[in-house]
Amino acid sequence: MTTFSQASVAYDGYFTVSDGGWTSFNEYPRQLGDINGDGRDDIVGFAGSEVYVALGQSNGTFSQASVAYDGYFTVSDGGWTSFDQYPRQLGDINGDGRNDIVGFAGSEVYVALGQ
């Protein structure tokens, strides 16, 4: 039988309603994916005008969030106002072991490679 440990706080500082105003997954989606190739999932959050990342740590917590991408995939930069209409996903597109952003816009699919 598979079970889980007792729940504990893994991150306190961003990506929630109280810390950052992340009030809607539809407008401000958050995804998990290994963007730096270390084998641990990281939090990737599409905020109002920037994409933030908190790197997964070996102890099951996350580092402080920092801006990882500034220029697209957000409400202010590109008009990505609806996850239903304009989903953003993470996946290793080029096989380098790091997840990339794949955004489905109105008439094109955009990719930002993880570095």
Image: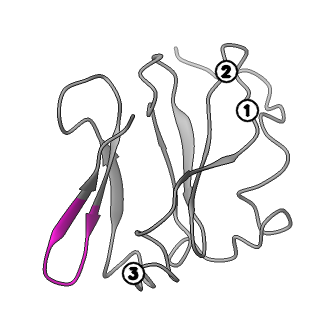
Mark 1, secondary structure of its residue: loop
Q: Kindly identify which residue carries mark 2.
A: 57
Magenta-span inclusion, residue 45: no
Nearer to us in this view, 95 or 25: 95
Mark 3, secondary structure of its residue: loop
Q: Kindly identify which residue carries mark 3.
A: 78
Q: Which mark is residue 95?
A: none
Magenta-span inclusion, residue 107: yes
Q: Mark 3: which amino acid?
A: Gly
Give the quadrant of residue 92: top left
Q: Position of residue 46 (x, y in %)?
A: 53, 63
Task: Describe residue 73's horizontal placement relative to residue 76 as left or right.
Answer: left
Quick one: label 3, few (<14), some, or many (20+) residues within 10 Å? Answer: few
Q: Residue furthest front?
A: 71
Q: Give the magenta-colored segment's residue range.
A: 103-110
Q: Position of residue 84 (x, y in %)?
A: 35, 78
Q: Kindly identify which residue carries mark 1.
A: 63
Task: Describe residue 40's horizontal placement relative to residue 109 as left or right.
Answer: right
Q: Are marks 3 and 2 in contact (CB under 8 Å)?
A: no
